[in-house]
Image (cartoon, rainbow, N blue to C red):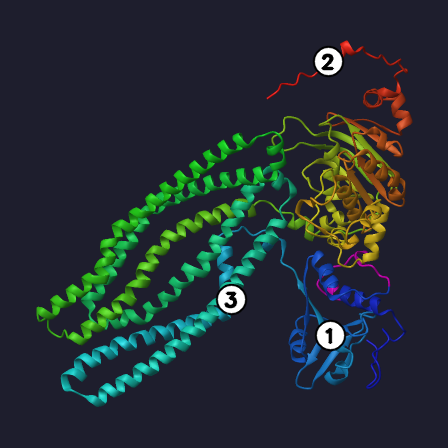
Amino acid sequence: MPDFPSTGGPPPGGPDGSDPAELRIAAVAAAARFHGIDLDRTRLREEGVPPSPAALAAWLSEAGLWARAVKLSWRQLAQAAPDRPVVVLFTDGSAGLVVAADTMRDLAWLRDPANPRGEPVVMDALRLSQWWSGEALLVRKGRGVAQAEAPFGFASVARLVFGQREILHHVVLASLVLSVLAIVPALLTSIVLDRVLVYQSWSTLTLVGVMVGITVLFEALLTHARGEALQVLSTRIDARLNLAVFERLLMLPLDHFERHPTGETNHRIGQIFRIRAFLTGKLMSTVLDGTTLLVLLPVVFWLQPILAAMVLAASGVVALVIIAFMPAMRRAYGRAIAAEVRKSALLVETVQGIRTVKSLVLEPQRREAWDAAVAEAGLAQVAAGRLGRWPRTLTLPAERFIDRGVLLVAAYLVLDGVSGVQVGALVAFVMLSGRLAAPLIGFARLLEDVEEVRTSVQQVALVLNNPTEAAAMQSGVSPRIAGALRFDSVSFTYPGARGPALDGVSFGIPAGTMLGIVGRSGSGKSTITRLLQGISRDYSGTVRVDGTDLREINLAHLRRSFGIVLQDNVLFRGTVADNILAGRPNLTHEDAMEAARLAGADEFIERLPQGYGTWIEEGSSNLSGGQRQRLAIARALVADPPVLILDEATSALDPESEAVVNANLQRIARGRTMVIVSHRLSSLLDCDLIAVLDQGRLVDIAPHDVLVEGCAIYQKLWHQQNRYLDRAPRERTVRAPADVPSLAVAEI
């Protein structure tokens, strides 16, 4: 870092007038290298504008590191620095690396990011505060692939709970103190009955009253404090559980979502809320109530061992009955949830396809299917509920014995004159037995709830425990991609398919080529684009990008380098500019405008009510199909990808919109490789090469003029689509009025 003066303005970047933005990027790259990661610096625009802390954190996160933009005090900075370098962001836009700190002497050692091998500069807190407002970037290694792909289950959920040790310690301590305070009223009642009433002791009564008041006050304060801690604990567990599930869901490959209905996935993931409610509700309260057993059991056995043994025996009977019903309850809950999954899948499918339902008048059929699904789910719920009531019915006598029978036995012991039994002690025992029985029965009931939650965990695991893309996203090389593509003897078969989608396909194109891909339906056109995106990776043969095996390239880097436009693209709720800049926080509004101009979308955007600030509703209902498609092309172009894939991108467009997109293809293709899949051959005339596929095999690859002369399949496709050009002009025949069919109109 520069040797900052003791007074004056902020430092002008570096000692040699270095660009502050360059220093900021260099500092972040140096912090990443400390953790063994080389960052792809092309991910950030280096135009003299310092990247924001959020953009830097996103840059690091995409490389597999954990990063957070934070505001630190001097003491917090000193505490963080000994473990790993901390990137401090200066007010002039530059940055430095704090590699060590001494809180006793208020000193920090800063390393110049432009010279990472140089000696660090010593800086005191006062001088550092002149250039540093507290903004910093904390960087550490991200979760390993093994941890990211750890199976979801009770063990992973338990780690989330026990990860909050500090709060748990406070909650458990407060619960133990409250358990002790719960004993005090019972003991004081015993004293009142056996001492105050018998000996008419007013002084003892006064002392007991004071103790009761103090106990109530402490109990109220501790209960409030424990409630606050429990609220924080449950909120943290809820947040971590939701974050972990959503992150794992995003790591699942695309083919998983293609094989499973959306409603099925939604319902299974929705079971996480039941797990959350169990963790932060019944489980937490039962475990905390269980702490009272540590205090109450010795006391109740001291007060009356015979009655205490009876309470334990009755609680054991409750537990045994519930354990006996657990296997059957597990199966019943499983059938009920499976029926709910099917019902949810039908509902989501109907909502997503409501346009088709309405246009084909499919309401009666969908209603019939829904009635059947509701009936099936209802019967399963009734069966599960009916089975669940039997344990409660069978254990009710034991529970009532704990509530009322113990009192009768205590009265019998007093009337029978059992030696050593005092009325005060028996009353105290009866008061405490209720507090003792509640956690004992709660533990027994907890077994019943565990079975239901275990079924929910299994449903969530059916989604989350599928193989993820974590390894491919966090490993592999990140080369600078130019766009040369090569397929060498590539074969691929979809799971469950009878034949291969691609069968020994081999071809290669240099960077900057515009490649068209044509063929009949099912010939393997879209499969080629899937392999290029790394969606399907279990193929034989080799796919190379600039000579590098595609499976050796970091998957996130690969997909960022490819712009993709599909036949049916999704625009998210937000403004037009937000959708164009989706996932690119480092880009500007000018970048969005340039991409829209290149895609031919600027002319209709300017006519929208608020231009680029126009809000796009869910489903893009306020845009036409052609407008949506041109926005999707602009979104793919905004990051200036070296490779652009158009997979049937113009097949759903009206002629005017298709003409606009086709007119811009040459301008879009300038300086990049383009792969265009289309069944409209007229949109491929400007392609350098056109690959013709048939039943998964590459039949030919050549320019249009060559194919139309020498490739039979291409000739047939061309003549089918352009046969009107071969027709000779025919004289139009005008039919007589008698030849024209008439419409009979019936009067109603």
Give the vertical position of 493 relative to 729 (above or below): below
**Residue at the image position 31 percent from the left and 50 percent from the top:** 322
Check whether the beta carbons of the residues at disc 3 and disc 1 lie within 8 A of each other: no
The residues bearing labels 2 and 3 have C-alpha atoms spaced at a distance of 81 Å
Q: Residue 486 falls in which quadrant of the image?
A: top right
In this orientation, does residue 241 appear?
yes
Callout 2 crowding tier (Cα within 10 Å): few <14, some 14–19, many ≥20: few
Disc number at residue 431? none
Disc number at residue 164? 3
The residues bearing labels 3 and 1 have C-alpha atoms spaced at a distance of 29 Å
Mark 1 is on which residue type? Val
Q: Earlier in the sequence, mark 3 or mark 1?
A: 1
**In this picture, which residue range is highlighted in magenta?**
31-47
Q: Secondary structure at mark 2?
A: loop
Q: Secondary structure at mark 1?
A: strand
Callout 3 crowding tier (Cα within 10 Å): few <14, some 14–19, many ≥20: few
Of residues 725 and 395, the one nearer the viewer is 725
Q: Nearer the viewer, mark 3 or mark 1?
A: 3
Of residues 394 and 702, the one nearer the viewer is 394
Q: Mark 1 — residue? A: 98
Q: Nearer the viewer, mark 1 or mark 2?
A: 2
Q: Position of residue 75 (x, y in %)?
A: 65, 80
**Residue at the image position 76 percent from the left and 39 percent from the top:** 543
Of residues 636 and 122, the one nearer the viewer is 636
In this orientation, does residue 461 appear?
no
Asked if the magenta segment contains residue 34, the reply would be yes
Quadrant location of the C terminus?
top right
Q: Mark 2 — residue? A: 741
Callout 1 crowding tier (Cα within 10 Å): few <14, some 14–19, many ≥20: many
Q: Earlier in the sequence, mark 2 or mark 3?
A: 3
Q: Position of residue 625 (x, y in %)?
A: 74, 39
